[in-house]
Amino acid sequence: MRLFTTVHILLFLYVISAILFWGFSLDKHSQTIYELEYATLISEVDSANNPAHFEARKTAIEEKRISRTKQYKGEGSTFLLIIVIGALVVYSSFRRSVRLSKQQNNFMLSVTHELKSPIAGMKLNLQTLERHNLDEEKKDMLVARCINEANRLNDLCSNMLLASQMEGRQYKPTKEKLSFTELLEDSLKDYSNRYADRIVAGDLEELNVTGDKVLLSLAINNLLENAIKYTPVDKPVTIALIQKHNTACLQIADNGPGIPDDEKDKIFKKFYRVGNEETRKTKGTGLGLYLTAKIVKQHKGKIHVKDNVPNGATFEVCLPLS
Ligand code: ADP
């Protein structure tokens, strides 16, 4: 990156200096032509005997010089402008591609980690089940853990699959009238089973929207997953579904670290994760919110995040009522 920037700047400076040099030499050239033409005029026309003719030719020579100056200044500035715009475009697209490849690299690392850790967890639990003679309660606990890990794996695979399908426009979303409340309750039931006592359902109004069941469930699950993931285990996550104007608004409020103001827009970008690989404590891929925002947009809805009080984040998704 540094080498590219240096080479880019040097090349840019070289081209600018070449244009300026070209401008100065053209100016000099034009001045020489003018002087030659003027000298020819003096030798050909006697200004004392024929002042009117002399003046007319002199004006013509000057006008030619002015028009030459205008022409090379105009062409030079256009050329300069094109070079500056081109250099800026090349530089910014290079930076963008470096950033994306860095994020993709991080994504690959995270994904490998994310895929391996539930598999390792399941394997360990199954080996314990196989090798030891355990009582029923312990067996149930190990089975529940395996299901939990399988669910995590399933969510991750769904996100990855859908991300690539949506990107390639292979996924054709359906449009059916559905109960947003039922969809939410199904997810809440699932999450309450997986994370006992961590989810508090507040006001859940009966509201219908139009859209794709699979996509909307995925969006809800991604938001629930994040809220659970980023909230300490002893703190609740509160859910509400209310009507605001002509929209059904899902609010998921957590008690985690919250999201700094300057990150609030960035977290919806593909592969984006707050912090860096060294400081991050949570696992993830940076795909969840990107997909969620894409799904919400596809359903002509709005998603935004604000601070929860006294701490944490509140994600709000508002979809048009059907
Ligand atoms: P990830 O798999 O990293 O969680 P997401 O796209 O779901 O990816 O989220 C992007 C980033 O936004 C996360 O890495 C995290 O830093 C931040 N984030 C998302 N949800 C929350 C939340 N509820 N509380 C705090 N930070 C969050």
Image: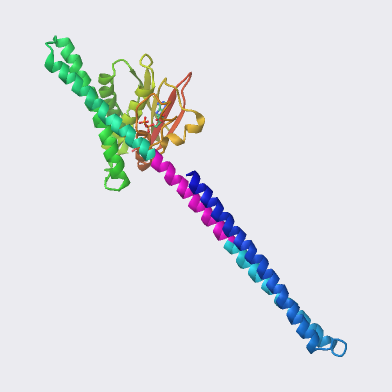
**191 sits to left or right of 19:** left
Q: 23 or 166: which is nearer to us?
A: 23
Residue shown at 25% from the left, 35% from the top: 157
Whether residue 177 appears in this view of the structure is: no
Quarter occupied by the C terminus? top left
Against 251, residue 171 (above or below) is below
Whether residue 229 appears in this view of the structure is: yes
Q: How is the image coloured?
A: rainbow
Task: Quadrant for residue 257, please give it.
Answer: top left
Percent x, y for residue 52?
83, 86
Q: Residue furthest bottom?
A: 49
Percent x, y for residue 321?
36, 36
Percent x, y for residue 41?
77, 85
**212 sits to left or right of 276:** left
Residue shown at 28% from the left, 23% from the top: 191
Residue 271 located within the stretch drawn in magenta = no
Residue 81 located within the stretch drawn in magenta = yes
The magenta stretch spans which residues? 80-102
Percent x, y for residue 136?
14, 11
Q: 88 or 34: which is nearer to us?
A: 34
Disc tally is 0
Q: 36 or 289: which is nearer to us?
A: 36
In which of the image's four quarters is ligand 1 placed? Answer: top left
Principal secondary structure, stretch drawn in magenta: helix
Task: Quadrant for residue 14, please give it.
Answer: bottom right
Q: Residue furthest right?
A: 48
